Amino acid sequence: MSEAPLNSVAQGGLDASTDVAIVGAGILGLAHAAAAIKRGLRVTVFERSEIAVGASIRNFGQMLVTGQPPGIMLDLARESRELYLGWADKAGIFARAKGVLLFARNAAEDAVLDEFMSTRASAFDYNVKLLRGADLANLYGGRFTRHRSALQGFDDLQLYSREAIPALASWLATQGVRFHFGTLVRHVEGGRLETTAGVCNAQRVIVCSGHDYQTLCADQLRALQPQVCRLQMLRVTPEDGFQLEHAVLTGLSCTHYGAFADLPTAQALAMQIEHQRPELQRHGIHLLVSPTPYGDWIVGDSHDYSQDARPFNAESVDNIMLDLARDTFGSKLRVVERWQGVYGAKCHVPGSGAFSVTRVDDRTTVALMHSGIGMSVGPALAHRHVDALVDGTALPQWTPPAALPTSAVA
């Protein structure tokens, strides 16, 4: 599959009216379009850019199930997986179903995996296996035997976002979705959208504006006190030609992802990292590696939270991530591309979570991610949102992760 131009979807004149108008053509906007078409609705999508340039094409393409905390986030990830597999079949999206490997490189990281397996994995039916001894030695011909163990997750998918997003848009266009790229929506109220292409009236308006909190529905979004997260990202080629087929994480990720982060061993690991490697904690670094369909890897990432995504990358941060990758794989790496990831990040409002669905008026809702897992849970969240609007039921809301059963805690 070759890289396609992101604005290759055919466009027509502006519809004066539509059943559902969606603002934003990232994964959340496209998933809402797919859900609305499935319910037999007329759908129009507006995207301010000529190409999709936001979080949805800047990420790793990891559709991560294993890292999600039990409760609504794990449920959404499992539902999203099935949606992606359906889109892969219908829209020709690359979706590698090899799963994920999370390597424990020392005793503290290994302890987290042990606790996860003995408590949460069995209690909430995570589809995982802990590899040690012969199982670890047989992995990629023994390349990873210097690590303590590896958690293998079987439900995780690997996408290639910069191709998956335009491919999904192109397929949706064949299903009847009308796209207007390069069209800014200036104002939304009561089903009326004022755009740079004219006025459109919709029975329902769904705003999926990513990390833009100021153009539309600014008063309602300001109440959430959201932030933006900036990430440093790289694409590399392994000089030894190593053919990686799994997404890869290390124990550093156990302090970041909700499936692990609240475990006592993960909290102890976080304290150890802060003491021994304060630069990792300071820059929010944990290693993620995603193989592309073309033999190279996407490597990251760091986390810098602020009100705006500042444009300046630090070479020292890139070097830390590259050193972590070289140490994990034992490969020399050649950098072929660098960029900034960006996504809507955590809110300061107490009780806020990884996403929000906010009703603005009788016809308008805003769906936003407040974490970097939109690719993992966005499709199912969109389908639940559209179903709620059509059926007149409660909008989906984030809830705290499910706790471990008392009997499972040793």
Image (cartoon, rainbow, N blue to C red):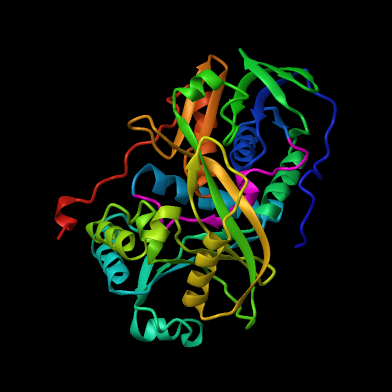
The stretch of residues the image draws in magenta is: 49-69
Residue 135 placement, left or right of 10: left
Asked whether 133 falls inside the magenta stretch, the response is no
**Residue 376 point in image, percent of width and height:** 51, 50
Q: Quadrant of the N terminus?
A: bottom right
- Please identify the quarter of the rendering in which residue 73 is found: top left
Residue at 39% across, 56% down = 281
Asked whether 55 falls inside the magenta stretch, the response is yes
Main SS of residues in magenta: loop
**Residue 229 point in image, percent of width and height:** 51, 44
Q: How many numbered circles does the render carry? A: 0
Q: Does 47 sit above or below residue 249?
A: above
Residue at 64% across, 35% down = 33
The reply to whether residue 394 is in sight is: yes
- Please identify the quarter of the rendering in which residue 12 is found: top right
**Residue 212 point in image, percent of width and height:** 59, 32
Residue nearest the viewer, comparing 188 with 227: 227
Q: Does 3 sit above or below residue 374?
A: below
Q: Quadrant of the C terminus?
A: bottom left
**Residue 77 point in image, percent of width and height:** 46, 49
